Image: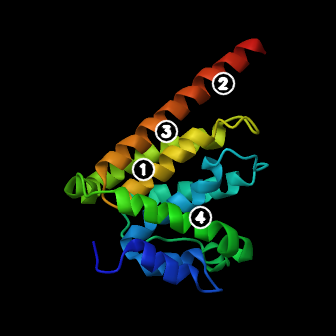
Amino acid sequence: MSETSLGDQLEACLRDDEVTLGRIDDTLDERSFALVLALLLLPSALPIPTGGVTHVLEAFAILVVLQMIVGRSDLWLPRRVANHRLGETFTAKAAPRVLRFVRWVERHSRPRGARLLAARASVSVLGVVLLLFVVGAVLAPPFSGLDTLPSLGVVLASLGLLFRDGLVVVVGLVVGAVGIALVIVLGWAAWSLL
């Protein structure tokens, strides 16, 4: 880990009025994949109604995960997305909460399995699993809340990858797998009723 903590780097980046995903990407370099993925899926991971807005974020999350799978070292986002300001609502309300959560995970995480998580093959395999979780969140019935667990799994696994903590990654994978199982079982039950 570098001398400056991730929380400090992120706070310095979010303090700017012109904060964009592109600026976060520039600040964090190779770690930006995991953080941008966590930020994109965080609204879906919250147990609140979002009215389908999260599907747009999930589409961009698929783009990020596909880049992880193919082994890109730099995150590519469409210029319009990379340069779009995250807005006052994000910087005033969401950013402090995100920072608190990131700092809490940072305080409690340890480099467990860091070597394995740093390997390009491991990141690609993890990307395939995260892609399944994101697709599961997209396919969850609207307004059912079933997208919450797969999205939370992606957020936790991304933070585990960000801090090179294999235990947090495993917890994220378990949460996401339970979420996918619920989507399948409840979706099958609903289909059977129809």
Q: Secondary structure at mark 4?
A: helix
In terms of image quadrants, where is residue 114? bottom left
Q: Residues within 10 Å of mark 1 (few under 14, many from 20)?
A: many
Q: Nearer the viewer, mark 3 or mark 2?
A: 3
Mark 4, residue position: 97
Q: Check disc 4 and give the amino acid type.
A: Arg
Residue at (44, 69) in percent of width and height? 32
In this rendered view, identify the residue nearer to me: 113 or 67. 113
Q: Is residue 96 left or right of residue 103?
A: right
x and y percentages locating residue 70 in the rendered image: 38, 58
Q: State the CA–CA distance, disc 4 to disc 2.
A: 33 Å
Q: Check disc 2 and give the amino acid type.
A: Gly
Mark 3, residue position: 176
Mark 1, residue position: 157
Residue at (27, 71) in percent of width and height? 1
Quadrant in which the C terminus is drawn: top right
